[in-house]
Amino acid sequence: MNFALPPSERPYPSKLFVEVTTACNLRCAMCVKQSGPGIPDEHMTMSTFQRLVPAFPMLETLLLNGIGEPLLHPRLEAFVQLAKEHLQEKARVGFQTNGTLLTPERARSLLAAGTNIVCLSVDATDPALFQSMREGGETEDVNRAAAALNAARARASSPDFHWGAEIVLTRDTLDELPRVVEWVGERGGAFLLVTHLLPYRQESVPSVAYNPNVDETLAFYREKSREANEQGIDLSRYIEARWRFRPVDNGERTVAFMEKVITEISARGLPQHVPNLVAHDEKQYRRMEELFRRCEELALQHGVELHLPSLSPRNKRRCDFIEEGSAFVAASGTVHPCYFLWHSFTCHADGRIRPVDALSFGSVNETPVLDIWNGPEFSDYRSEIGRYDFPHCGNCSLAPCDYIERHDFEQDCLGNSLTCGSCPWSVGVLQCLR
């Protein structure tokens, strides 16, 4: 094993995300499964899973989930057991689950097989709100699941096993976040992942809680907006004043001030989407800042490892999937580079329609997994991503454009063949178990 090289340059993946099934027993409104792309229900076969074994001895993490509910797979424990026979002693094996099928018996069998991390989907503690987000689920399901995991851990004396939770943060669930932190801590959970919503439907766009402007641009704009307010100028009226939709107090001064701001942002080499900037909701942003501070304090009190997303997209991007040497294997056996390009779907990132096509480098049923990883296509892709030389599509005043609104993506406005300019993971607003 060559640990001297960065994970993306090693001749083997360090993390494998294996989609054991695309089937699910719930109909969560915020899930790509329910967004209409037609992802068929499919269980990964044992023969396909066995083709991943050559990569196991070098793995640090093996996560057995994707679009579906892992506990629906009848051979999940067999997958875990097979993996543990080949993994390093300190390697992690786990999955995320909605918890509805996590009975005491299933929890014991999973720990006995070698599972050492489980993440429960807990989007609210309020029963009605929980049901509205997770159709078919109830808060009592995750309560029972947490109790089952704790009992199985105590019975098996598994000090290396830990569980936690993930919440999808929306404007409707902001007040639930502190309660979920407490819920995890009071039940012995180790961590809480917090991710923003990626809307797969137009009607979900108003539920998005994060600010769409990149952090460095937003920080500069907030500073200038305060200066403008001190001079009696309201920059939120810029669009009206600029295009003279209706008379605006201090209209000419508003236009002059904002256009100077636009020029200064451009001079700093920062991306900007002017309509989003002037629509910035300072009250909402401060509410989010205070909420995150409060949750960090609660997490510290309860001994919970809290992973918060960015309040707004980061200007300095980082693809954790590439940087950490990850590969994603679909239930069918095809190999992909990340969550964003695992399946084909349509989303409404930043309120704009965005078709996304899955990117596959081959199938383990046809080509050995390490040959796919080391093949020129996947290797070159990882190298190119690492340069981060692609635009901030969500923070461009010219967007939406036909470069990213087509399913047959060819290139972005800089000539890159990468589809990463609108990825919400690399800018820190989306997170997942990894």
Image (cartoon, grey):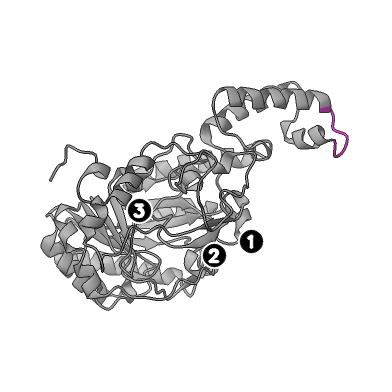
Q: Nearer the viewer, mark 1 or mark 3?
A: 3
Q: Amino acid at mark 1?
A: Glu
The residue lying at 71 percent from left, 27 percent from top is 258
Q: Is residue 131 left or right of residue 318?
A: right
The residue under label 1 is 203
> Residue 337 — which label?
3
**Label 2 vs 1, first from the N-terminus:** 2
Q: Position of residue 115 (x, y in %)?
A: 21, 64
Query: On residue 173, which mark appears?
Result: none
The x and y percentages for residue 250 are 83, 26
**Which residue is drawn at the image coordinates 39% and 40% (left, top)?**
318
Query: Disc 3 marks which amino acid?
Result: Pro
Query: In what element is the residue under mark 2?
Result: helix
Query: Considering the numbered disc 3 on the image, is that residue within a helix, a strand or a loop?
Result: loop
Magenta stretch prevailing secondary structure: loop
Image quarter for residue 144? bottom left
Q: Is residue 121 left or right of residue 333?
A: right
Write the start and end of the magenta stretch as one range.
244-251
Q: Which residue is pictured at 37% across the width and 52% down the height?
A: 192
Q: Look at the image and tell me whether residue 109 can be seen.
A: no
The amino acid sitting under disc 2 is Leu
